[in-house]
Image (cartoon, rainbow, N blue to C red):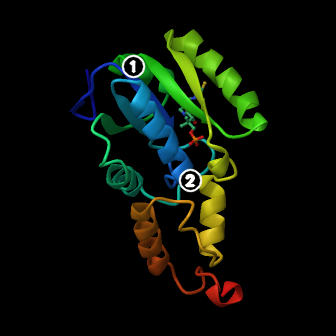
Protein backbone atom coordinates (compact mmCIF):
# COMPACT_ATOMS: atom_id res chain seq x y z
CA UNK A 1 0.00 0.00 0.00
CA UNK A 2 1.18 3.52 -0.70
CA UNK A 3 0.07 6.98 0.42
CA UNK A 4 1.59 9.97 -1.37
CA UNK A 5 4.23 7.62 -2.71
CA UNK A 6 5.13 6.36 0.76
CA UNK A 7 4.83 2.62 1.38
CA UNK A 8 2.54 2.17 4.37
CA UNK A 9 2.03 -1.26 5.96
CA UNK A 10 -1.40 -1.80 7.58
CA UNK A 11 -1.71 -0.04 10.88
CA UNK A 12 -3.49 2.92 12.37
CA UNK A 13 -4.41 6.14 10.64
CA UNK A 14 -4.58 9.33 12.71
CA UNK A 15 -6.38 12.00 10.68
CA UNK A 16 -6.65 15.71 11.34
CA UNK A 17 -6.19 19.27 10.14
CA UNK A 18 -3.11 19.82 12.32
CA UNK A 19 -3.29 23.58 11.82
CA UNK A 20 -0.94 23.39 13.68
CA UNK A 21 0.09 20.18 15.45
CA UNK A 22 -0.19 20.62 19.23
CA UNK A 23 1.41 18.76 22.12
CA UNK A 24 -1.97 17.09 22.58
CA UNK A 25 -1.81 15.72 19.02
CA UNK A 26 1.78 14.61 19.55
CA UNK A 27 0.81 12.80 22.75
CA UNK A 28 -1.86 10.85 20.84
CA UNK A 29 0.62 10.01 18.07
CA UNK A 30 3.22 8.78 20.57
CA UNK A 31 0.68 6.64 22.41
CA UNK A 32 -0.78 5.24 19.18
CA UNK A 33 2.75 4.44 17.99
CA UNK A 34 3.29 2.43 21.18
CA UNK A 35 0.12 0.40 20.55
CA UNK A 36 0.04 -0.14 16.78
CA UNK A 37 2.83 -1.45 14.53
CA UNK A 38 2.61 1.65 12.34
CA UNK A 39 0.79 4.97 12.52
CA UNK A 40 0.02 7.10 9.49
CA UNK A 41 -0.64 10.72 10.38
CA UNK A 42 -3.04 11.82 7.65
CA UNK A 43 -3.30 15.55 7.07
CA UNK A 44 -6.53 16.66 5.42
CA UNK A 45 -5.75 18.98 2.51
CA UNK A 46 -8.87 21.14 2.73
CA UNK A 47 -10.37 21.09 6.21
CA UNK A 48 -14.17 21.42 6.16
CA UNK A 49 -14.22 23.81 9.08
CA UNK A 50 -12.21 26.76 7.77
CA UNK A 51 -9.31 27.77 5.55
CA UNK A 52 -6.13 26.64 7.30
CA UNK A 53 -3.59 29.24 8.44
CA UNK A 54 -0.66 26.99 7.53
CA UNK A 55 -0.07 25.56 4.08
CA UNK A 56 -0.27 21.82 3.60
CA UNK A 57 3.54 21.68 3.34
CA UNK A 58 3.97 23.66 6.55
CA UNK A 59 1.52 21.44 8.41
CA UNK A 60 3.26 18.29 7.18
CA UNK A 61 6.77 19.61 7.84
CA UNK A 62 5.83 20.46 11.41
CA UNK A 63 4.61 16.89 11.96
CA UNK A 64 7.68 15.38 10.30
CA UNK A 65 9.98 17.41 12.57
CA UNK A 66 7.99 16.72 15.74
CA UNK A 67 7.75 12.96 15.15
CA UNK A 68 11.28 12.23 13.96
CA UNK A 69 11.98 10.34 17.21
CA UNK A 70 9.26 7.82 16.29
CA UNK A 71 10.40 5.10 13.92
CA UNK A 72 6.96 3.73 13.06
CA UNK A 73 5.18 6.95 12.12
CA UNK A 74 4.55 8.10 8.54
CA UNK A 75 2.93 11.30 7.29
CA UNK A 76 0.64 11.66 4.29
CA UNK A 77 -2.10 13.94 3.08
CA UNK A 78 -5.54 13.19 1.77
CA UNK A 79 -8.47 14.91 0.07
CA UNK A 80 -12.12 14.06 0.33
CA UNK A 81 -13.50 11.22 2.39
CA UNK A 82 -11.34 9.85 5.16
CA UNK A 83 -13.13 6.50 4.94
CA UNK A 84 -12.22 6.15 1.25
CA UNK A 85 -8.58 7.08 1.88
CA UNK A 86 -8.28 4.79 4.92
CA UNK A 87 -9.73 1.90 2.92
CA UNK A 88 -7.50 2.61 -0.08
CA UNK A 89 -4.31 2.44 1.98
CA UNK A 90 -5.49 -0.60 3.91
CA UNK A 91 -5.58 1.03 7.35
CA UNK A 92 -6.59 -1.37 10.11
CA UNK A 93 -8.01 1.25 12.44
CA UNK A 94 -8.69 4.97 12.71
CA UNK A 95 -7.32 6.69 15.82
CA UNK A 96 -8.91 9.78 17.36
CA UNK A 97 -8.08 11.65 20.55
CA UNK A 98 -10.89 12.66 22.88
CA UNK A 99 -10.38 15.71 25.07
CA UNK A 100 -13.77 16.54 26.51
CA UNK A 101 -17.32 15.15 26.47
CA UNK A 102 -18.24 17.46 23.59
CA UNK A 103 -15.58 15.72 21.47
CA UNK A 104 -17.20 12.38 22.17
CA UNK A 105 -20.60 13.56 20.98
CA UNK A 106 -19.35 14.54 17.53
CA UNK A 107 -16.71 11.84 17.22
CA UNK A 108 -19.18 9.05 18.00
CA UNK A 109 -21.34 9.71 14.93
CA UNK A 110 -18.26 10.32 12.78
CA UNK A 111 -16.81 6.99 13.90
CA UNK A 112 -20.03 5.17 13.10
CA UNK A 113 -20.27 6.83 9.69
CA UNK A 114 -16.65 5.96 8.91
CA UNK A 115 -17.24 2.34 9.90
CA UNK A 116 -20.41 2.21 7.85
CA UNK A 117 -18.58 3.60 4.81
CA UNK A 118 -15.38 1.59 5.11
CA UNK A 119 -15.76 -1.18 7.67
CA UNK A 120 -12.84 0.38 9.56
CA UNK A 121 -13.35 0.94 13.28
CA UNK A 122 -12.25 3.97 15.27
CA UNK A 123 -10.26 3.67 18.48
CA UNK A 124 -10.46 6.62 20.86
CA UNK A 125 -7.51 7.60 23.02
CA UNK A 126 -8.45 9.78 25.97
CA UNK A 127 -6.42 12.96 26.05
CA UNK A 128 -3.89 13.28 28.82
CA UNK A 129 -5.53 15.75 31.26
CA UNK A 130 -2.60 18.15 30.91
CA UNK A 131 -3.53 18.58 27.22
CA UNK A 132 -7.33 18.41 27.42
CA UNK A 133 -7.84 22.16 27.01
CA UNK A 134 -5.40 22.57 24.11
CA UNK A 135 -6.70 23.01 20.59
CA UNK A 136 -5.08 24.28 17.40
CA UNK A 137 -7.50 27.19 17.21
CA UNK A 138 -6.85 28.33 20.81
CA UNK A 139 -3.10 28.01 20.32
CA UNK A 140 -3.27 30.22 17.22
CA UNK A 141 -5.43 32.79 18.95
CA UNK A 142 -3.16 33.00 22.00
CA UNK A 143 -0.01 33.14 19.87
CA UNK A 144 -1.20 35.85 17.49
CA UNK A 145 -2.44 37.91 20.42
CA UNK A 146 1.08 37.78 21.84
CA UNK A 147 0.72 35.05 24.47
CA UNK A 148 3.29 32.36 25.26
CA UNK A 149 2.51 28.97 23.72
CA UNK A 150 5.77 27.08 24.32
CA UNK A 151 4.07 24.55 26.58
CA UNK A 152 1.26 23.84 24.10
CA UNK A 153 3.11 23.09 20.87
CA UNK A 154 6.26 21.09 20.02
CA UNK A 155 9.45 23.11 19.54
CA UNK A 156 9.42 22.56 15.77
CA UNK A 157 5.91 24.03 15.53
CA UNK A 158 6.93 27.10 17.50
CA UNK A 159 9.66 27.87 14.94
CA UNK A 160 7.23 27.67 12.03
CA UNK A 161 4.68 29.78 13.88
CA UNK A 162 7.25 32.47 14.60
CA UNK A 163 8.25 32.48 10.94
CA UNK A 164 4.61 32.75 9.93
CA UNK A 165 4.03 35.65 12.27
CA UNK A 166 7.03 37.45 10.81
CA UNK A 167 5.46 37.23 7.34
CA UNK A 168 2.26 38.92 8.43
CA UNK A 169 1.78 42.59 7.68
CA UNK A 170 2.24 44.85 10.73
CA UNK A 171 -1.51 45.52 10.81
CA UNK A 172 -2.13 41.77 11.06
CA UNK A 173 0.37 41.34 13.82
CA UNK A 174 -0.77 41.59 17.37
CA UNK A 175 0.43 43.78 20.14
CA UNK A 176 2.78 41.66 22.17
CA UNK A 177 3.31 44.57 24.55
CA UNK A 178 -0.16 44.01 25.94
CA UNK A 179 0.92 40.66 27.28
CA UNK A 180 4.44 41.36 28.44
O1 LIG B 1 -8.23 18.06 13.29
P1 LIG B 1 -9.67 18.05 12.87
O2 LIG B 1 -9.99 19.33 12.11
O3 LIG B 1 -10.62 17.81 13.99
O4 LIG B 1 -9.81 16.81 11.85
C1 LIG B 1 -11.04 16.55 11.24
C2 LIG B 1 -10.91 15.43 10.20
C3 LIG B 1 -9.87 15.78 9.17
C4 LIG B 1 -10.53 14.14 10.89
C5 LIG B 1 -12.31 15.30 9.57
O5 LIG B 1 -12.75 16.57 9.18
C6 LIG B 1 -12.34 14.38 8.37
O6 LIG B 1 -12.34 13.18 8.52
N1 LIG B 1 -12.36 14.98 7.16
C7 LIG B 1 -12.43 14.25 5.92
C8 LIG B 1 -13.82 14.39 5.30
C9 LIG B 1 -14.73 13.24 5.71
O7 LIG B 1 -14.37 12.09 5.65
N2 LIG B 1 -15.96 13.62 6.15
C10 LIG B 1 -16.94 12.66 6.60
C11 LIG B 1 -16.76 12.32 8.06
S1 LIG B 1 -17.83 11.01 8.57
111 or 123: nearer the eye?
Answer: 123
Q: Residue at x 56, y 13 (%)?
A: 115
Q: Residue at x 41, y 74 (%)?
A: 163
26 or 64: nearer the eye?
Answer: 26
Pinpoint residue 131: horizontal percent, then vertical percent.
Answer: 63, 50
Q: Are marks 1 and 2 in contact (CB under 8 Å)?
A: no
Q: Secondary structure at mark 1?
A: loop
Q: How many marks?
A: 2
Q: Is residue 124 left or right of residue 61?
A: right
- Write down the residue under mark 2: 51
Q: Residue at x 30, y 49 (%)?
A: 68
Image-quadrant location for residue 1 = top left
Image-quadrant location for residue 4 = top left
Q: Residue furthest bottom?
A: 177
- Write down the residue under mark 1: 91
CA neighbours of label 2 inside 10 A, class few (<14), some (14 to 19), many (20+) = few
Q: Secondary structure at mark 2?
A: loop
Q: Residue at x 69, y 84 (%)?
A: 179
Location of residue 134 with respect to 165 vertically, above or below: above
CA neighbours of label 1 inside 10 A, class few (<14), some (14 to 19), many (20+) = many
Q: Is residue 17 visible?
A: no
Pinpoint residue 6: horizontal percent, then vertical percent.
Answer: 23, 33
Q: Quadrant of ligand 1?
A: top right
Image-quadrant location for residue 141 = bottom right
Q: CA distance from mark 1 to mark 2?
A: 27 Å
Pinpoint residue 46: horizontal percent, then vertical percent.
Answer: 50, 44
Amino acid sequence: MTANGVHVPPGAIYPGSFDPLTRGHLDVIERAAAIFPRVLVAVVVNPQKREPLFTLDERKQMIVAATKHLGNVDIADFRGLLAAFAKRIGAGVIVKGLRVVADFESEMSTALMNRSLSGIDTVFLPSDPQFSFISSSLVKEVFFLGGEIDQYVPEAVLHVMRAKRATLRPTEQTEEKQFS
